[in-house]
Amino acid sequence: MEFVFASKNIELTDAIKTYVTKKLSRLEKIYDILQAEVMISVEKYRHIADAKLITKKDVIKASETSHDLYASIDLLYENLERQLKKIKGKKTEKRKESTVSQAESEFEGVEIVRKKIDEKPITLDEAINLIQKNTEGVLAFYNSETENVNVLYKNSDGSYTLIET
């Protein structure tokens, strides 16, 4: 990351530049940053730290004010970190959505019906009784004997198949 410093009503010492560089360099772990433009200024009793981070696709700006210069820089770092995490989260969310929509497009015309299983644990005998009453021939249930989710389905010859997880 390249740093560009500017100041107003204060002399930027090497210590200040080093502190800002060290602090803002941590942000590269979160997001790929090309350039950081930092403006440090003092107005009466207020110390103001402004920053503009330039990435490949985004520009992130933040400004923080406090009575202490180093506190302003710390607050600025927290503000930028929060913004970068939010942007990164949105981009990963978009990727997840696009993979889901691609998967759904492969099965166009196929209707998917979702059903929730009953939370009440039942035994295998109770499950067989329920599947005999059920016209679909498939039942997912929470087995009280094994304490796992099982799937029971009726075969075409009248027998039953139990899938245990």
Image (cartoon, helix red, strand yellow):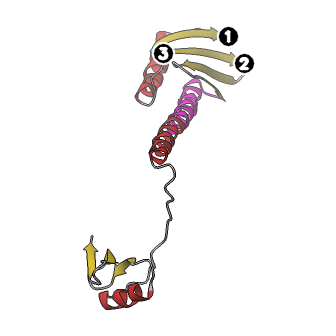
In three-dimensional space, the C-alpha distance between marks 3 and 1, rounded to whole angstroms, equals 27 Å
User: In terms of secondary structure, where does tag 1 sit?
Assistant: loop
User: In terms of secondary structure, where does tag 2 sit?
Assistant: strand
Mark 1 packing: few (<14 Cα in 10 Å), some, or many (20+)? Answer: few
The amino acid beneath tag 1 is Asn
The x, y position of residue 23, in whole percent, is 46, 25
Q: How many marks?
A: 3
Disc sitting over residue 113 in the figure? none
Query: Which span is picked out in magenta?
Result: 66-89
- Whichever of labels 2 and 3 marks the residue nearer the N terminus, that label is 3
The amino acid beneath tag 2 is Glu
Disc sitting over residue 9 in the figure? 1
Q: What residue is drawn where x is 48% and y is 48%?
A: 104
Q: Return the residue nearer the eye: 32 or 51.
A: 32
Q: Which residue is mark 3?
A: 34
Check whether the beta carbons of the residues at disc 1 and disc 2 lie within 8 A of each other: yes
- Whichever of labels 3 and 1 marks the residue nearer the N terminus, that label is 1
Camera-side mark, 3 or 1: 3
Q: Quadrant of residue 157?
A: bottom left
The amino acid beneath tag 3 is Leu
The x, y position of residue 136, in whole percent, is 44, 77
- Whichever of labels 1 and 2 marks the residue nearer the N terminus, that label is 1
Q: Quadrant of residue 9?
A: top right
In three-dimensional space, the C-alpha distance between marks 2 and 3, rounded to whole angstroms, equals 30 Å
Q: Quadrant of residue 79?
A: top right
Q: Which residue is mark 2?
A: 43
- Rendered view: 49 above or below 138: above
The quarter of the image holding the N terminus is: top left
Q: What residue is drawn where x is 38% and y is 78%?
A: 141
